[in-house]
Amino acid sequence: MDKILEEDNIKLDLPVKINYGVLEDVLQKKLVGEQIGMEDSRGTVKNYVEVLGANLGKSQEFNFDLTLNLKLKTLTTLFKNKEVNLLVHLALGFNEVDQVIDIIEYELEGQSKNWLMDNSLETLANTLIYKKIKNKMKLDLKPHINEQLGKVNEKLSEEMETAPGVFLSGNVNILKVAQIIPGDTLLLILLEISAYGFIDIKEIKL
C-alpha cells in the first residue's frame, strides 16, 4: 500500500508567464552603471563605454526573439561623454538537460548619427559589449529550481491541513523547465512536474 502511495500520480505541464518588464528590471540592475573595457598587456584596464540604460522587448527582426536597447556613454578620448544607443537583437537558446537559457545568436544595430562612431561602436560591441551581455543574460535555472523543489517538499513532508479534518501530503520528484517560448510581451516557460500526493481525511464534520 505504501509503495502505491509513493508512485507518481500527478503529472502536470504548467505554463508560467514572465513579462518582459520583469526581465528588464533584472537586466537594469545587472547592467546599468557597468563600465565596459579591456585590460592591456601591462594590466591596466581601459574602459570604453558606460551603460546608462537598458530596455528589453520583442525583436521585430526575423529569426530573433528579443531586442535589448542599450543607452551608452562613451569614455574614449576621441568620443568622450557622447551618448549613443545600441540595439542588440538576440536569439535565445535553451538546453533542457542543463536547464540553461543562453544567447545563441545576435545582431547589432547602432543608432547614432555619426558614421564613424557607429562603426567604432559596432567593433567594440562585437568584442566587448556582446560578451558582457551574453554573460549577464545567461541563466542557469537548476539552482533556482532545486531551491524551490526543496521548499515545496519540506512543506509536503508534513501533512498540511487544507480544510477542517482534511490533510495533504506527498513529494514532488521532478520539477524542470521543458520549453521556453518568447512572445510579444512576455516569456512563456513550460514547467514539467511529476509528483505523488494524497489526501488524508481524518475527520468528517456534518
Image (cartoon, rainbow, N blue to C red):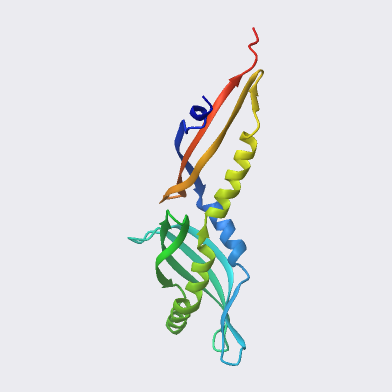
- Asked whether 173 or 115 is in front, the reply is 173
| Count of number-bearing discs | 0
User: Which residue is outermost to the bottom?
Assistant: 42
User: Which residue is outermost to the top?
Assistant: 206
Q: Position of residue 119 (x, y in %)?
A: 42, 82
Q: Position of residue 83 (x, y in %)?
A: 55, 75
**Above/below status of 109 relative to 187:** below
Q: Position of residue 195 (x, y in %)?
A: 50, 36
- Asked whether 19 or 151 is in front, the reply is 151
Residue at horizontal 48 percent and vertical 27 percent from the top = 4
Residue at horizontal 48 percent and vertical 32 percent from the top = 7
Q: Is residue 165 left or right of residue 141?
A: right
Residue at horizontal 54 percent and vertical 30 percent from the top = 197
Q: Classify residue 150 by image quadrant.
A: top right
Q: Is residue 123 left or right of residue 39?
A: left
**Above/below status of 192 relative to 199:** below
- Asked whether 61 or 105 is in front, the reply is 105
- Asked whether 196 or 37 is in front, the reply is 196
**Above/below status of 177 relative to 50:** above
Q: Is residue 99 left or right of residue 37?
A: left
Q: Position of residue 164 (x, y in %)?
A: 67, 18
Q: Classify residue 113 by image quadrant.
A: bottom left
> Where is the C terminus found, in terms of image quarters?
top right
